[in-house]
Amino acid sequence: MNVKLSLLAAGLALALGAPLAPAHAQAPQGQTLRYAFQGNLNTLDPYGINETTTLALQGNVYEGLTKRDRDLKIIPGLAERWEILDGGLRWRFHLRRGVKFQGGEDFTADDVVFSASRVRADTSDLRSRIEANVEVVAVDSHTVDFKLKSPNPILHYEWDTWYIMSKKWAEANNAVAPSAPAATTPGYAVLNANGTGPFRIAAHQIGVRTVFEKNPAWWGKVEHNLQQVIFTPITSAPTRVAALLSGEVDVIDPVPLQDIPRINASPNARVMEGPELRTIFLQMDQRRDELTGSSVKGKNPFKDLRVRMAFYQAIDMEAIRRQVMRGAATPSALLISPLLFERSGQFQRHPFSLDAANKLLDDAGYPRVGGATGTRFELTMDCPNDRYVNDGAICQAVTAMLARIGIKINLQAVPRAQFFAKVLASGGFNTSFYLLGWTPGSFDSWNVLQNLIRCRDDTGSGGRGATNLGGYCNPRVDALTDQILVEADAAKRLDLITQAYKIVHEEISHIPLHQQALAWGVSRNVELVQRADNQFLFHWVNKR
């Protein structure tokens, strides 16, 4: 059965109220958690794609040197402790002893050194986890030094999703290099996993389901009562809700906003709502000399600030918040949540104004063809339709809004696997205008500047600007980003961050839209932890 047919069968079974077939272990029903998400788990390779849901699912199997607790505080993981030496130029990590990978290999310093090299490979989407110039050295079997060229007080801020892999397992299975999302032939690590975490993979069918089972040999304190978890992608929102209400699944993500009252009124389920740290935004290709998928030939209109500002001012964010998001969104002027940047109040969105937008396009030399209601130019927009809350509907709204200023958008809204394979570095940054969401893994502005804003080359090499898909570039912002990384004085650091944000706000590097809110549908017999980073970790689930 191919993937498409399998998905159809799974969705149809749920729609008809038929139970999904048991997947693997014969765990008691009460100890099996059934979790449905709107998209697929396309890779088990922890360096394949830097995307929250994928990393969260992998994080039930793999672990990093550090972790984050229920309140997102950094705590020890595979490293029991660490110390900063040589004036900040050397970080020493003391590794946990007695840990084994699920394949039986002992966890040692060699695995950390190997993982540091693998995560910085050209085919890795997580290269920003460790700067290319950091030297990683095994001091002994359970001690690793990270030697830096300059101090970095936030070196480990996003290491909870830099998962450590087994060197022996990777070498034995020809998985030394990561497989990119766009790879036509998936590598061994895409379909198989071997971590140290509280769960292990029992079965994995991309697009159909993935079965996790409890790892009885896990080194940590068990805080859940599960024996297995069955993950099933259910693209259809009505089918997802029906599955929750009928008891076919225990957790769904996300809940369609219009269905929140109905779920809360049911005897079987409730909706867990909360703030999310993710910012949804648009970006325009400012790097190519000619856009792909545009009627404008011989030049790139997005290199002109007036065009970028016109797009910004033509988007009625309040209408999107009210009509598309049903109030469950907070309009944003920046690419970071106000919860993570204390000076966000200094920034306001550029005002919505069709008159201003039309004048800017006239001044930029893109008149309407055919009169007052004519088209100025056409453009392709790339959008996922199963990744963020109402992402496809947001893109449709943007398309309609831009039409009012004479921009004809040819919208390509596709499943997130297809979307990421096209627009990320592995797909050649093949987009001229797109929608994306971002949660800084470090919960720090440097992550935003480093990944989304700083200059990049055509391949995103070195991890710098790796997710700056539109190729915005300002050397002054890069210099500030470098200063921010090494500045230990909190007040000075905040000043530097503010300076950088002022530049990109005025130059319209991106068009921030909003922070979306979390809405998970949860069976009333399930207790779990909902973190603001939108990572659902099975380790904190208890089912009655």
Image (cartoon, helix red, strand yellow):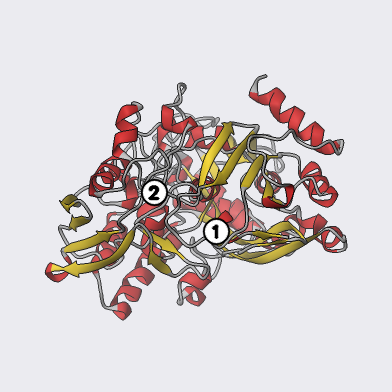
Residue nearer the viewer, 349 or 190 = 190
Residue at the spot x=42%, y=46% of the render?
467
Quadrant location, the N terminus: top right
Query: Which of pointers 2 and 1 indicates the residue nearer the eye?
Result: 2
Residue nearer the viewer, 144 or 503 = 144
Report if residue 412 is visible in the image: no
The image shows residue 50, relative to residue 321, as above or below, that is: above
Q: Quadrant of residue 98?
A: bottom left
The image shows residue 289, relative to residue 483, as above or below, that is: above
Give how far across and how far down residue 502 sits, in percent: 41, 67
SS at badge 2: loop
What residue is pinned by disc 2?
Answer: 163
Give how far across and how far down residue 71 sits, in percent: 51, 71
C-alpha distance separating marks 2 and 1: 24 Å
Relative to residue 292, is residue 384 drawn left or right? right
Residue at the spot x=42%, y=53% of the render?
161
What residue is pinned by disc 1?
Answer: 279
The total of numbered circles placed on residues is 2
Q: Name which of mark 2 and mark 1 comes first in the sequence.
A: 2
Give how far across and how far down residue 101 sits, in percent: 38, 44
Give how far across and how far down residue 406 sits, in percent: 65, 42
